[in-house]
Amino acid sequence: MVSVDNFALLDIRIGKVVGVEDHPTARKPMYKLIVEFGPEVGTRTIVAGIRAAYSKEQLEGRKVVCVVNLDPKQIAGIESQGMLLAAGEIDNLAILVPDRDIEEGSRIR
């Protein structure tokens, strides 16, 4: 079990996907996403293994839910500066999105 205090350490926010590119060197189908989180967090690059489930057009301009305070991680040569949240398996994957329009950078509470 994870305590509420431990869960509270995660900084989960709403971001807007402003750029989507194929990850050129990844072994699995991945995207390099450029996500805007508002003035407090700024713009981040996030590598996400969702290319088999979503087209670039489905992601561009979409609001998404991401963890923004993880340590950066190199994924096939690109630094990922957060984690896009999704549910399910790759053949039935659903990214987490807000149910109404909300400002980029809004915290998940």
Image (cartoon, helix red, strand yellow):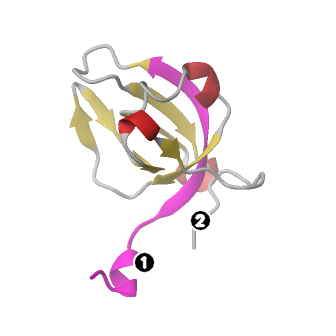
* Residue 62 part of the magenta segment: no
Question: Can the viewer see residue 47 in this picture?
Answer: no
The residue labelled by disc 2 is 107
The residue labelled by disc 1 is 8
Q: Amino acid at mark 1?
A: Ala
Q: Is residue 96 above or below residue 24?
A: below
Q: Is residue 13 left or right of residue 8?
A: right
Q: Is residue 76 left or right of residue 89?
A: left
Which residue appears at 49% of the width and 61% of the height? 12
Return the x and y of residue 9 as percentages of the image width and height. 38, 74
Which residue appears at 25% of the width and 42% of the height? 73
Which residue appears at 42% of the width and 77% of the height? 8
Which residue appears at 38% of the width and 76% of the height? 7
- Asked if the residue at tag 2 contacts the one at tag 1, i.e. Cβ–Cβ closer than 8 Å, the answer is no
Give the class, few, some or many, for how many residues have Cα within 10 Å of label 1's Cα (few <14, many ≥20).
Answer: few
Residues 43 and 84: in front is 84
Element at label 1: loop
**Outermost residue, top side:** 24
**Magenta stretch in the rendered image:** 1-21
